[in-house]
Every structure is written in C-alpha cells, then in structure tokens.
C-alpha cells in the first residue's frame, strides 16, 4: 500500500510517499481502509523533531482518519467489515491507504457525515470536548470565549458551546475565518489583531467578563485572558507556542483558574464519554466538522504548511481514496 513515511525529522519536505507492507489486525485490533486522513498541528511538531515525544524512525504520521473497516481482529465484537467509521488514534499512522487501530479507537460514522468530515473528528473534536466539558466544566448559560476559533479545534468548540446553551464569542485573524465562526452560531466574532478586541468583548458581557476561555495560543493571549474573566472564570489552555509573563494578581480577586488541556490525559472512562457525546452530536447534526481544504496524499507537505497558517479556515484533510 501507499503511505507517507518520515525517514528523518525536519521540514515538510521529509514527508515522502512510499510503498509499504499492509498492516494486519491482531487481537482487539481493526484495519480501516482510509478514505481521508486528518492533518493536525501536533503532527507538524512531531515531524520537526521538536515535540517532547518522538516516534521511532521511520514512521507514518497521523492519528485521525475515516474510512471503511476491512479486517476485524479476534475479540472485536461491535464492528464488522464494511462499516463506515472514523479513527481517533492509530497504531500505524493514518497518512496511508490502510491504518491499524485498537478497536476501542474506531467509532461508527453516521450516514450523512462524509469521510472528509469524519477525518476531522479525533484530535479536534476530542480536544474540544476535553477542554470544554471535562477541563473547563462549562455550564449552560456560561459566556464562552473561543480564542482562535477558525481552526479544527476552534470550530468544534464553538459548535459544542452553542449546543450546550452557552453564549459564545469567537476570535479569528481573517475575515473569511470570522464569517465561518459566525455561521456556527457565535453571537460575537472579533478580530484578535484589533487593538480594541478586549473592549469589544467586555462590552458584550456588560462588563461582567466571560466565564470560560478556550485558549489556542496562550503564549500570546493568556495575560489579556485573565483580565477578561468573570468571577470564578476558567481559562482552558489548549495551545501554546512558547512562554508568557502574567500577573498572578489577575487571578486572585476573580478566584480564577488556569487549566491545562491534554487529550492524551483522558482516562478510559473520559474517552468513552467523549466519543459517546461526539457520536450523539454527529447523529443529531449539532456537531459537523467544517472541511477547509482537501488535498491528495501526495500533497502531505503542502498540508503541513497549510495547517499552520493563521488564515486556516476549517479542517485540512488528505483524501486518500476516492469512492
């Protein structure tokens, strides 16, 4: 089968298409014929060799995919060959024509949800669920700010907050991206490059501040985030690309919390809850991944460049097999 292989850490150019042996399913495992694979920012960090956890070389990138079950290993009773599924965690990598995954990481994909959309579920929607529900513990009627709302995790967060009954504010760096966030149900969408964006948000809340901030770039925004919180407010740090200096006093009078979000930290029960909720949201239509760009498997390098652009709008996916 064809797969993207990384022989050495480096820039996007190290992503090369090669012929490799087909994976085989062991006990409790499933082989999925990949129709589309999701591209996530974390995969660019791993590829560069700068991520804390590095795979052994050579390796195939990717954790998220959608496709059709081709082989079911011993002990897997809830999936059958031919099932439409999405993969939220791969053993062999998903930038390939086939991927190997534990059966517990393979979930049914409802009719009406495309393979390209299904490829955008694992990391983005899982991270959004963990940040919004499990770490920030958002409540209906909370005012929620999704800071950096135009990417895969941001769009998922907006959809979840709207469905949960929250009043939602989103930020984005491009006019096109902000329009997309508005389409998802955010009441207020602001340009975080605008010097007055904090004033716009505080005016929207009547000066009370926001209850929850889902933060995608904490090294830039955390200091201002703390000053926008309502009493008892929570910042869930989903992304950061460096260090930041804050004034701890901004947390004190508000009795505010800063909470880290790590998808890999979810327990088995939390993971099961997460995908039960995501599955229900897909089935009812309140959750729908927005696909911003579809590229061929051979364009993986370009996909890695695109997923890191601030103007990214929706999810970047690799279309592996068109049917």
Image (tube, rainbow, N blue to C red):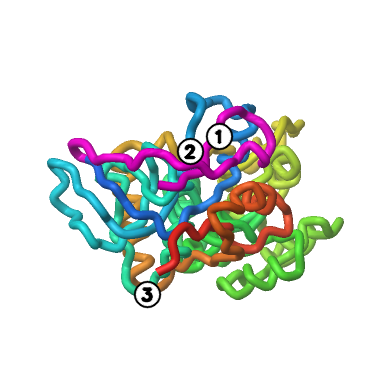
Q: Earlier in the sequence, mark 1 or mark 2?
A: 1
In the rendering, at what x and y percent does residue 52 appear? 57, 25
61, above or below 140, in the image = above
Whether residue 302 is visible to the viewer of this picture, yes or no, is yes
Residue drawn at x 38%, y 42% as measured from the top left:
90
- Which span of residues is magenta-colored? 1-28
Corner quadrant of residue 276: bottom left
Residue count near mark 1 (Cα–Cα under 10 Å), binned few <14, some 14–19, many ≥20: many
Corner quadrant of residue 265: top left
Residue under pointer 1 = 6
> Where's the C terminus, which quadrant?
bottom left
Residue under pointer 3 = 112
Helix, strand or loop at disc 2? loop
Residue under pointer 2 = 60
Q: Is residue 123 left or right of residue 312?
A: left
Pointer 1 with pointer 2, Cβ within 8 A: yes
């Amino acid at each position: 089968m064809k797969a993207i292989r990384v022989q050495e850490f480096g820039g996007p150019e190290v992503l090369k298409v090669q012929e490799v042996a087909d994976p085989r399913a062991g006990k409790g495992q499933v082989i999925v014929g990949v129709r589309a694979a999701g591209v996530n920012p974390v995969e660019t960090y791993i590829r560069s060799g700068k991520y804390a956890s590095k795979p052994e070389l050579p390796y195939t990138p990717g954790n998220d995919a959608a496709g059709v079950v081709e082989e079911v290993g011993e002990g897997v009773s809830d999936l059958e060959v031919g099932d439409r599924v999405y993969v939220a965690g791969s053993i062999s990598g998903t930038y390939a024509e086939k991927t190997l995954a534990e059966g517990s990481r393979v979930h049914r994909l409802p009719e009406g949800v495309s393979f390209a959309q299904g490829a955008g579920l694992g990391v983005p929607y899982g991270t959004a669920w963990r940040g919004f529900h499990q770490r920030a513990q958002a409540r209906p009627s909370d005012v929620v700010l999704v800071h950096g709302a135009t990417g895969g995790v941001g769009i998922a967060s907006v959809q979840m907050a709207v469905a949960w009954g929250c009043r939602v504010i989103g930020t984005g760096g491009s006019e096109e991206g902000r329009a997309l966030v508005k389409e998802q149900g955010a009441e207020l969408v602001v340009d975080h490059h605008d010097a007055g964006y904090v004033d716009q948000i505080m005016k929207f809340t009547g000066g009370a501040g926001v209850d929850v901030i889902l933060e995608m770039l904490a090294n830039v925004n955390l200091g201002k985030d703390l000053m926008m919180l309502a009493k008892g407010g929570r910042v869930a740090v989903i992304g950061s690309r460096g260090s930041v200096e804050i004034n701890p006093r901004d947390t004190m009078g508000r009795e505010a919390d800063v909470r880290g979000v790590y998808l890999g930290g979810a327990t088995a029960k939390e993971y099961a809850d997460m995908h039960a909720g995501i599955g229900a949201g897909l089935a009812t239509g309140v959750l729908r991944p927005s696909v911003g760009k579809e590229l061929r498997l051979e364009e993986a390098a370009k996909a890695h460049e695109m997923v890191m652009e601030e103007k990214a709008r929706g999810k970047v996916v690799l279309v592996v097999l068109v049917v």
